Structure formats: structure tokens, C-alpha cells
Image: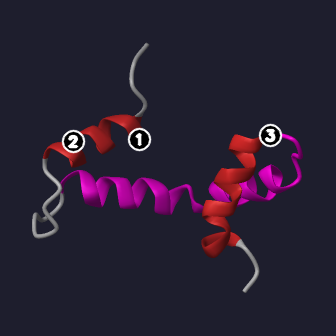
Amino acid sequence: MAASLYEELSAKLEKDPRLTKRGGPRVDLSLLLFNAREDVRVLWEAAQSVPGNAELEAAVERLRPIFGRR
């Protein structure tokens, strides 16, 4: 099975995590997530309403500071 774009960029970032490097996987990953921000928010909203899945509930809680009410 081929790796996803996210997995490929994450693997590249693990190999070279420098903050000072211009461009590269860090910027690509940022753009990828920025461009999918509305879809991620919709996914988070949907995941909040699914009870009984401990792994999903834990993921929702980790994202709550970003997407939850302030």
C-alpha cells in the first residue's frame, strides 16, 4: 500500500527536522493542513458526536484546544 502524502511528508520531516531550513517538508505539511483546515474542522465536529470509541474520543480531546470552544 502506498504511503499517503501526509505520511511521506512526515517521514521527510523526521529525517531533517531543522526549523531553519527554507521550504521542504515542514512548509509542505503546513500548506497541506492549512488547505484542508475546513475538512479537518468538519471531521472534528463529526468525531465529537461518536460515543463509545475510546481512541476517537482521545483524539478529539487532543484537538479540543484547537477546534473546541474557548
Q: Earlier in the sequence, mark 3 or mark 1?
A: 1
What's the amino acid at mark 2?
Lys
Magenta-highlighted residues: 24-52
Helix, strand or loop under label 2: helix
What's the amino acid at mark 1?
Tyr
- Rate crowding at label 2 as few (under 14), some (14 to 19) or many (20 or more) other CA atoms within 10 Å: some
Q: CA distance from mark 2 to mark 3?
A: 31 Å
In the picture of the structure, the residue carrying the numbered disc 3 is 53
Q: Relative to 32, say whether 3 is above or below.
A: above
Q: CA distance from mark 2 to mark 1?
A: 10 Å
Answer yes or no: do the residues labelled 3 and 1 have beta carbons within 8 Å?
no
Q: Residue at x 10, y 63 (%)?
A: 21
Tell whether position 47 is magenta.
yes
The residue positioned farthest toward the bottom in the image shown: 70
In the picture of the structure, the residue carrying the numbered disc 1 is 6
Q: Earlier in the sequence, mark 2 or mark 1?
A: 1
From the image, state whether disc 3 or disc 1 is nearer to you: 3
* Residue 40 x/y as whole percent: 63, 55
Q: Which mark is residue 14?
A: none
Dominant SS of magenta comes to: helix
Task: Tell me where residue 42 sits by quadrant.
Answer: bottom right
In the picture of the structure, the residue carrying the numbered disc 2 is 12
Q: Residue at x 31, y 35 (%)?
A: 8
Image quadrant for the C terminus?
Answer: bottom right
